[in-house]
Structures are given as structure tokens and as C-alpha cells.
Image: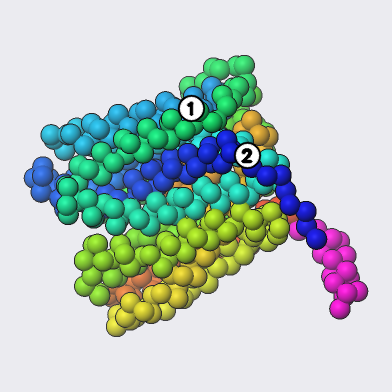
Amino acid sequence: MTRPGPQLDRAARLGLAAMGVAVLVIANDFTSLSVAIPAIESTFGARVSTAQWVINGYALVFGVAIVTGGRLADMFGRRRAFFVGCAIFAVFSLVGGIAQSVGVLLGARALMGIGGALMWPAIMGMTYGLLPKGKEGLAGGLILGAAGFGNAVGPLIGGGLTDTLGWRWIFFLNLPIAAFAILVTWRVVADDPPATVDRRLDGLGVATLSTGLLSLLLALDLGSAVGWTQPRILALFGLFALAFAAFVFVERRAGARALIPPDVLQNRTFFAACMSVLLMSALFFAALMYVPQFMMKSLRYSAMRAGAGLLPMMGVFAATSFAAGPLYGRLGPKRIVSAGAAFLAAGMFLLSRLESASPYAALIPGMVVLGIGVGLFYSSVTTAAVTALDPSRAGLAGGIVYMFQIGGGSIGLGLNTAIVGAGPNLAAGIRNAFRVDTVLALGGLAVAALFIGGPVDPERLRDRRHHHRAHV
């Protein structure tokens, strides 16, 4: 019989609750404004292409700054980084809520992205730090479960506030929630000493990585709209290549002071986790984009109803994420991450059978299976990645994993958009794109099965097989 692990005291439980609330704010913010875009257009007389940057600008800055945020959290203390990030997020939520021009609103959203990029890796580091050894799997489940719940209820909260009090209240709602998270964290989470006495930030590393990521994400975002062979898109890809080459050169010279230190780059399990996240994020972001598109354009759903239509996927995602923590402790990283990847591949395959005349009910099995996969995979692969490194790297590890998630999602959206656009109709285009996504998921499954939790050891497998036979 398995002995119960160490129990969590009241302070740890309150701290975990505060971390869950903080994640909820960030995750909700990604999706709640998606249904408010028409109202924002109307308020400022802006075009949809401009108003869309309320979402795109936040995600872009968040994705670019996340690794720097993780490094700062490890260098100066995660609790401090969390307070600074939360304050930035709250202040510019207020600015966004009272904005009288679309320019001010977009600027506020970009600065909210900086706040979120400081908060997220700090939350990751503090959550893993609050849990005793043997319960690390609960951290990934808590964080991704709260994120899944926030993503799921975001369109419902955003739509409800937009239809009643107005879209500005989506921003105002962040203020009391952020205040609660700060207050509880201040009271129950101990101040953590910085991981290093050398607090000099690798400025060249930050500059080159940020330039490269910004160029890549902009190229992927704009290329699907204006065409991949446009000179400005090619120039952005060229700038990405130059900046990435410069980043590699700068990091080699920086040594231990590097933005991404050598011990992180050389860790095979961590690298494998990041590669599997890159592949899987391509299909998860594609499902979030094109399943609602099918509901709105083929089934004639409203934006609000399409958001609710995603609940079979997002609700299962949230519930499975919470369950994944205990399963991680029992099954280990290789089995649980591989199982999640297998469910992701199966879910995309089911959704790839979509036809123009398919009713909503035909989407539900694929969404449920995909939701199980997302819940099992992301929470467990995050834990596998963070625990593969020294505890002093927890914030940086969380930031890098999320960077790969954003990068994979952006690349996947660009690829899926090109394939969907080339199809004879929407359903056929989605079907073709989701088949490609299924192949990517199988690639992610192979990486997880072979390398996460250590490489496959043929001798160990043979011994285990003999052991099972002896008990049949």
C-alpha cells in the first residue's frame, strides 16, 4: 500500500489558493476580451484589424518578455517579482479601463503583458516551492487547472460584462482579484532569497532574444493576413534569423551570467519537454481558433454561444489538469506526459473528420478527448520540465516552457491558416489542417515517450516485461 505523502499546512494551502487566483486572472485575460472586440470597435470607431491588437499585443509582449521575467524572478526573488508584476498588471488594467482612445488602450494592454510576464514564472516558482518533495505534480495540475478554468470562463465573463456593465469592467475586475492575490501572498508566502548573488542581467541576451522573438511572432501574426512572400514579412523572418544567431553568440560568451545559462541548455529532459510543448501547442491553438470559427460560420452560432460551445473541451481540460497532479506522482513523468500526448493526437484525429454538414454534437467527442489530452499533457510536461532543473531555475524554466508554448501556438496558427485558406471550403480546410496537426501530435508523442522522464532503457523494459510475466 502506498504511504500518504507529507500533508500541506494551512499557510501552504492559502498560498496555493493565491497562486491559483493569480493564474486565473492571467488566463481569463487571454480569452475574456475576445467577445468584447466588436464593442471596443464601436466605442473608438476603430477597425477590427486595430481592435484585434487588444488581444494580439498583450499576447505578443507576454510571449517576448516571459523568459526575461523568469530570469528576473530567479535573480531577485519570485515573491518580489510577483508583487511588481501584479502591480503593473493592476495599474494598467485601470488605465485600459478608463482609456479614452484606442492608442492608450493598446499601450495599456502591452504593459499588462509585461506584468503578466513577470507574474507567470514567479507563480510557477512559488507554487513548486510551496509543495514538499513528492508532491511536485500537484503544482502543474493546480497551475494548468486554474489556467484552463480561466480560459473556459473568460468568454462567458467577458460576454456577460460587455452586455451588462460594458467592456471596461473586464479590466476593472482585475483590480480586486489582483489585490486579493497580493494580500494573501504577502501574508502566507515566505520571502525567498535570490538564487544568485550576481544580479547583473544579461542585457545583450535580453535584447537579442526579445528582438528575435518579436520579429518571429510579428511575422507569423501578420503573414497569414498579408501573405508570406510580402517584403516586410520576409524582412521580419530575416531579422529573426540574425537576432537568433546573435543570441547564440552572446549566450556562449556570457557563461553563467547568460539569460539562459549553460546548465539549462544542456539538460536533455528539459529540452525534450520544450520540443514536445512546441509541437503540441501548434494543434491546441489551432483548435481554439478554428473550432469556434466552424461554430460561427457553419453552424451560425453567435460569438457568445461559440465561446460556450468550447466548454466540453475547456471544462474537461480544467478538471483533468487538477486530476493530473496525483496521477503524476503515481505514474511518473514518462507515462502521464505520453498519455496526454496520445489523447491530444486522438482528439485532433476525431476533429479532423469534420464535414460541412456536421452538427455541434459531432464536435463533442473530439473536444472532450482533446480536453483530456491538454489537461494531462500540459500540467505534467510543465512539472517534468521544471523538476528536471535545479530548484533555483524554477522561474526561468517556467518562462522558457511558456515561451515554447506561445511560439508553437503562433507557428501552428500560421500553418493552419495557410492550410485552411487553401481548402475549397471552411470545413474541408479545417479537416486538412487538423490532419496535419494529428501528425505533429504523433511527433510530440514520440518525443515524450522516448526522452521525457529519461531515455528509454531497453534493459529496464526487458526486466519489467519478465517481472510482469512472473506475476501472470
SS label for mark 2: loop
- At horizontal 48% and vertical 67% (from top left) the residue drawn is 370
- Quadrant where the N terminus is found in the figure: bottom right
- At horizontal 45% and vertical 73% (from top left) the residue drawn is 366
Label 2 crowding class (10 Å Cα cut-off): few <14, some 14-19, many 20+? few
SS label for mark 1: helix
Q: Is residue 447 visible?
A: no
Q: What span is in magenta?
A: 456-472
- Of pointers 2 and 1, the one earlier in the residue sequence: 2
Q: Position of residue 61 (x, y in %)?
A: 36, 37
Q: Determine the CA span between mark 2 and mark 1.
A: 17 Å
- At horizontal 47% and vertical 39% (from top left) the residue drawn is 18
**Please, is residue 345 above or below residue 385 in the view?**
below
Nearest the eye: 406 or 25: 25
- Residue type, mark 2 in image: Asp
Residue 471: within the magenta? yes
- The quadrant holding residue 198 is top right
Label of residue 117 in the image: none
Label of residue 186 in the image: 1
- At horizontal 29% and vertical 41% (from top left) the residue drawn is 173
Q: Is label 2 in contact with label 1 (beta carbons under 8 Å)?
A: no
Q: Position of residue 440 (x, y in %)?
A: 52, 63
Label of residue 9 in the image: 2
- Quadrant where the C terminus is found in the figure: bottom right
- Residue type, mark 1 in image: Trp
Q: Position of residue 352 (x, y in %)?
A: 42, 74
In-image side of 42 versus 128 (left or right): left
Nearest the eye: 463 or 224: 463
What is the basis of the colouring in this image? rainbow
Residue 449: within the magenta? no
Label 1 crowding class (10 Å Cα cut-off): few <14, some 14-19, many 20+? some
